Image (cartoon, rainbow, N blue to C red):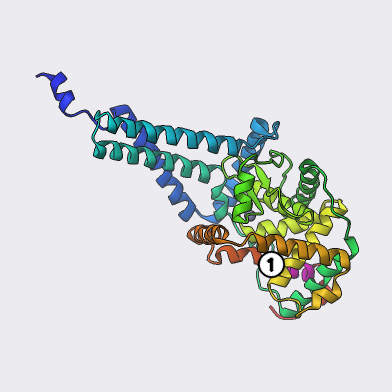
Amino acid sequence: MNSGERRKEHVPLLSQRSRWIHAALVAAGAVALFALRLLPPSWIERVYSRGAYPSLVRAADILWGWTNASIFEAGSAALLVFLSGWAVLGLARVRRRQGRLRRVLVRGLAHLAAVSGAILFLFAANWGLGYRREPLPARHPELARDATPEEIRAAALAEAAGANLLHLPPANGPLAEFDSAARRGLASVLADYEGFDFRDGPPAKEFLILGKVMDLLGVAGFCSPWTLEAHANPSLPPCRVPFVLAHELAHQAGYPDESEANFLAWLACLASGDPYSAYSGHLSLVLYFESQGAYEEGELGRILEAGPLADRELARRWAAERTNTGSDLWRSGYDAYLKAGGKAEGVRSYSRVVDYAARHRASESPGEEPKGD
Ligand SMILES: [Zn+2]
């Protein structure tokens, strides 16, 4: 049998070894999807979130905590270059008639499926499984029910009073200072409130180019699920930076849920021992309470003093200026992503922080707890 000739006629799309690798990566992606949808939350809480995950954060800190450069950004750029090079080579091969378009396309799709499987697996194993951990109310029953209108109202007024009391001129310190204050606050909150030891983790990073993309999409902060690096949008008004950073650090600590990250960020800002961070926590909550209609029309103009009022205006203008087709698309995409991950509220889940904060405040002053359930 002339195998040489046969091979010429039927050059396999992928070699035997490469076929195995492709199949394994696609299977890894499928396992990740299965785990993200079906593993029991109590198991994830114990074995993953409080078991393996802290070591992953520590490893990320050892691997790239020493540099200010975003490894996520560098890695994304490298992946982009690799994928483009690959596409260009494929097209060149078609043009040289070494392969037919269909073959090149099928091979390209096989590669794409394998790369997607690998990315999905790394996403789930490195961070994404946290989406299925037990929700905060499972450990803190006072958060299990919605706050009453009275509780919301009391908390909304208390946050406005906190912002008035702690208002300071804009702090324009380096990101590292905000990072250490937020980290200190978060570590103490997680230790006292969650019985969870969190200290290590790569410090907040600054993007070279992706900061512009975040700005275009109106994204305030981002924690990379693959490298566990936190980033804040460089254009954010200073009064928002500590809160946004604390929110991203809560993600880094293994709390992917947006409402929980907001709630822990608020607690972390208040516990940081840094007055400007505490101010940022109060002011950010005022913005959330306002978005949920907790104040009467024009009320904030009367109850907020000039400083916090100006900062609230800055924060509102920042968001308004970044509302465009790109940000709408991003928001709908992220909404779909959260819903696909089982978060029925989608992006609206951010504002659940209003209920958490109001319930937390009410439970801290038990004399005011309403009777009943
Ligand atoms: Zn977030």
Which stretch did the figure color magenta?
352-363
- Ligand 1 position by quadrant: bottom right
Left or right of 100 in this view: 351: right
Name the residue at 69% across, 70% down: 355
Of residues 320 and 136, which is closer to you in this image? 320
Left or right of 22 in this view: 69: right
Question: Quadrant of the image for the C terminus?
Answer: bottom right
Query: Amino acid type of disc 1?
Result: Leu
Q: Quadrant of residue 263?
A: bottom right
Left or right of 171 in this view: 70: left
Q: Is residue 222 above or below residue 140?
A: above
Return the residue at label 1.
143
Of residues 118 and 312, which is closer to you in this image? 312
Name the residue at 70% across, 60% down: 318
Name the residue furthest front: 95
Name the residue at 88% across, 67% down: 306
Left or right of 12 in this view: 176: right
Of residues 355 and 15, which is closer to you in this image? 15
Provide residue 137's location: percent of width, then percent of height.
65, 63
Q: Residues within 10 Å of mark 1 (few under 14, many from 20)?
A: some
Question: Quadrant of the image for the N terminus?
Answer: top left
Q: Main secondary structure of the magenta part?
A: helix
Q: Is residue 5 visible?
A: yes
Name the residue at 64% across, 59% down: 322
Of residues 50 and 265, which is closer to you in this image? 265
Provide residue 224's location: percent of width, then percent of height.
60, 44
The yes-or-no answer for disc 1 within 8 Å of ligand 1 is no
Q: Quadrant of residue 94?
A: top left
Name the residue furthest left: 1
